[in-house]
Amino acid sequence: MSAQRRKTGHRRLSRRRRLARTLLITGCALTVMAGGGAWYVYHDLASGIASSKALDGAAKSAHGDVNILLMGLDSRRDQNGDPLPEEVLDQLHAGSSDIGGYNANTLILLHVPGDGSEAKAFSIPRDDFVQIAGGQGPGHQDKGNGNGNGKDKIKKAYGLAKAAKEEQLSRDGVQDRRRLEREGREAGRRAQIETVRNFLGVPVDHFAELNLAGFYHLADALGGVPVCLKKPVKDSYSGADFPAGRQTLNGRQALAFVRQRHGLEMGDLDRTKRQQAFLAGATQKLNSAGTFTDPVKLLKLIDTAKEDVVTDAGWDLLSFVKQAKNLSGGKVRFTTLPIEGFGRNHGEDINVVDDMKIKRLIAEQIGPRSTTATTPGAPDAAPSSSPSPSPSSPSSPVSPPSSAPPPPQPEKGAIDGGGIPCVD
C-alpha cells in the first residue's frame, strides 16, 4: 500500500472517529439537558402546588393499587381565602365571593389498579345523606350516635369541619386570618376524606382539591375541552347555552357546563354526569393535544395547577403525570353511585342511600384486596346511613325508597360523541 493511500485511510478513520466522538458528546449533552428539563419541570410542579398533610398516617391500598379522591369545592375564594377577582367571577358567571361556601360539590374516587388494567371512577352524588366525620359546625344539631358525629349531606363534611376548627381556634385567641383559613381547611380536608373513606369502605391514597375557578383555567390551559350533548340546553342560572352534539368548550363555557342542574331532568344527578363527561373530554384532550410531550402546554397546565389545586404532601406527581398519560387513552370507566330515594332533613332535600350496598358495590368493582386496609383508630365500617327523622326536627320525614330512579349504569361513550360520552 502506497504512503498516499495510507494517509488517506488515516484521514478517513480520523474523521469517522471525530464524528463518532461528536455524536457521543452531543448525545450525552442532550441526555443531560433532557434530564435537567425533566428535573426542572418536576421541581417546578412539586414546589409550586399547595400541599396538605390531611392524609398523614392514613392507611394505604395494597398491591400497587391507588385510590385518588378528586374534590371540587363550590367556593368563590382562592387558596388563601381571598375573594376571586371580580373579572374572574364575571367570567365564571358564579356570583359574588359571598355565595357558595366550602361544600365539596364534586366528589369522584378514581381507582387506578396496580396491574395496569382499566381504571374506574366513582362519582358520589353531593346530596347523599351519610355519617359525617370530624367536628360539627355551628348550628349543626344532629349529633347522630352521640360520639360527636352526625348525619348530613356528604358535601358538607368539609365546610362543617372547617367552621368548627375556626371557631375553636378563635375561642383560643387566634386572630390571624391566614392561620384560621389554613388550619380550617386542613380540618375540612381531613373530615371530607374520612367521610368518603368510611362511606365507601376503601382507603384514600391521594387527593386533589380543585376550587371553582379550576374548571375554567383547566379548560383554557388545554385549549378547550370537547363534550357532547344529546339536546340543546339553556340555563340562566349557570350561564349554560349550548347546542346539541359534540363541541369544544372554553373556560367560561366549561364551568357553566359542569355547574348546570336547573332544566335537567334529574337535577344534581345529571350534573354529576356532566362532571364525568368533562373529565372524559379533558383526558382525551390531554392525549390528543400532545400536552405531555409539549413543554409549553405542559408548563401552562402546571401553572394552572399551582393556582387552583391542592394535593397531599406525599404524592409523587411526576410519576402520576406519566401514569395520567396512559389514563388519557380512554382507559377509565365512569360510574355514578346509586341512591335509594329522596328525602328531607332539616328542610333540605337529600339522597337516601344504603351505605352497606355502596360498600358491596365498591368491593365488587375494585376487588376486595383494596378494601382490607383501614384508617388507624377508625371503625371498620361506618354506621348505617339510612336517614331517619332528626331528633331535633321530628317533622322532617324521609321519602320512601319507592321514589328512587333505577340504579344508574356505568356511562359509556356514545358513537356520535366521537369517543366521549353524550349527556343530557
Image (cartoon, rainbow, N blue to C red):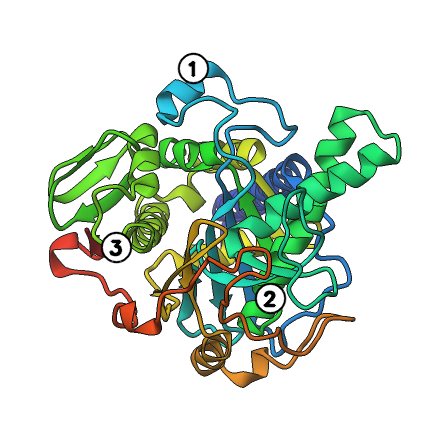
Q: Residue 14: give x, y in percent of width and height.
A: 56, 44
Mark 3 lies on a secondary structure that is loop
Question: Which amino acid does the dot numbered 1 rest on?
Answer: Glu
Q: What residue is pinned by disc 2?
A: 197
Q: How much space separates mark 2 and mark 1, taking CA atoms?
A: 37 Å
Mark 2 or mark 1, earlier in chain:
1
Q: Residue at x 70, y 57 (%)?
A: 55
Asked whether residue 323 is in view, the answer is yes
Q: Residue 90: give x, y in percent of width and height.
A: 38, 19
Of all residues, the one furthest to the top in this rendering is: 87
Q: Residue 290: give x, y in percent of width and height.
A: 36, 44
Q: Nearer the viewer, mark 2 or mark 3?
A: 3
Mark 2 lies on a secondary structure that is helix
Q: How much space separates mark 1 and mark 3, taking CA atoms?
A: 32 Å
Left or right of residue 264, residue 85 in this image: right
Q: Are marks 2 and 3 in contact (CB under 8 Å)?
A: no
Asked whether residue 224 is in view, the answer is no
Q: Nearer the viewer, residue 402 or 179?
A: 402
Q: Residue 286: give x, y in percent of width and height.
A: 37, 46
Q: How much space separates mark 2 and mark 3, taking CA atoms?
A: 26 Å
Question: Which amino acid does the dot numbered 3 rest on?
Answer: Met
Residue 329 is labelled as: none
Left or right of residue 256, residue 126 in this image: right
Q: Are marks 1 and 3 in contact (CB under 8 Å)?
A: no
Mark 2 or mark 3, earlier in chain:
2
* Total marks placed: 3
In the image, residue 381 above or below residue 157: below
Q: What residue is pinned by disc 3?
A: 266
Q: What residue is pinned by disc 1?
A: 87
In the image, residue 322 above or below residue 79: below
Q: Which of the 4 quarters of the picture holds residue 63?
A: bottom right
